[in-house]
Image: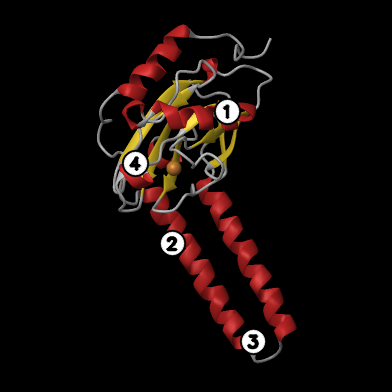
Amino acid sequence: MQTPISSHNNESTGLVLSACGSESTEAPAAAPPADSMTDTVTDAMTDTMTDAVEDVTEQVGAGMAEATGAVEGIVGEANDAMDVVSEPAEGQPAAGEGDPCSLSIEAGDTIAFSTDAMSVPSSCADVTVTLTHTGTMPKQSMGHNWVLLPETAIQEIGIAAARAGLNNNCVPDDPRIVASTEVVGGGESTSVTFSLDALDDGTTYGFACTFPGHWAVMKGTFTVSG
Ligand SMILES: [Cu+2]
């Protein structure tokens, strides 16, 4: 038997709903200032990039072919640096930004999410998604939320959401919705925590912003790996 992903968990569903309706979430825990891991990554990246870029600069005069090769080298080195530093200890998720069960996504004053693909390991007991509105427009005109739902239901629920209204955070009453945040405006942040038990095995999930008219563009895939 696999992990009981297919079993419905009413407790977690209740938790989702209450989290959705709650006023504001605790602290904008979203982005604590650079921690040591970030520093390390940044240092590694900066060193690698700086050295390589200097190399490229010298080589450009010698010919585009060589320069191109060097650029590819930079990308390779930079990726290597990222891999080494960002890889969390196997099976032991680190706290904070390194926690694979805690995802962040951003949206600003345009109808767009910062990513169209989110993924978590199946080992996560709970998953927390934090949505940060990096723009300045109010939520009445450019609000965003984050809703987890079956990918095939995005259009239907997106349309129904327009009737749900801002008072309901643009989330219609639909049992297929696994989790949702409140609608936030510029400078605001919100998060939702849910259990992977609430996901059905065999269903392909996606996420979307259900603010009226946004779902057609602001959507992506949500996968559980492992
Ligand atoms: Cu939106």
Separation of disc 1 and disc 4 at Cα? 30 Å
Circle nearer the viewer, 4 or 2 = 4
For the residues labelled 3 and 2, the Cα–Cα distance comes to 25 Å
- Crowding at dot 4, Cα within 10 Å, few <14 / some 14-19 / many 20+, comes out as some
Instruction: Tell me which label, 3 or 1, sits earlier in the chain.
Output: 3
Residue annotated with mark 2? 43
Direction from residue 135 to residue 147 in the image, left or right = right
Instruction: Note whether residue 126 is visible.
Output: no
Q: Which residue is mark 1?
A: 156
Rendered position, 64 above or below 78: below
Q: Nearer the viewer, residue 151 or 13?
A: 151
Badge nearest the viewer, 2 or 1: 1
Q: Nearer the viewer, residue 21 or 45?
A: 21
- Ligand 1, seen in the image, is in the quarter at top left
Q: Which residue is mark 4?
A: 30
Say which of 57 and 151 sits in front: 151
Residue 151 spot, x, y in % from top left: 62, 30
Check disc 1: other Cα within 10 Å, few if <14, some if 14-19, many if 20+: few
> Looking at the image, is mark 4 or mark 2 earlier in the sequence?
4
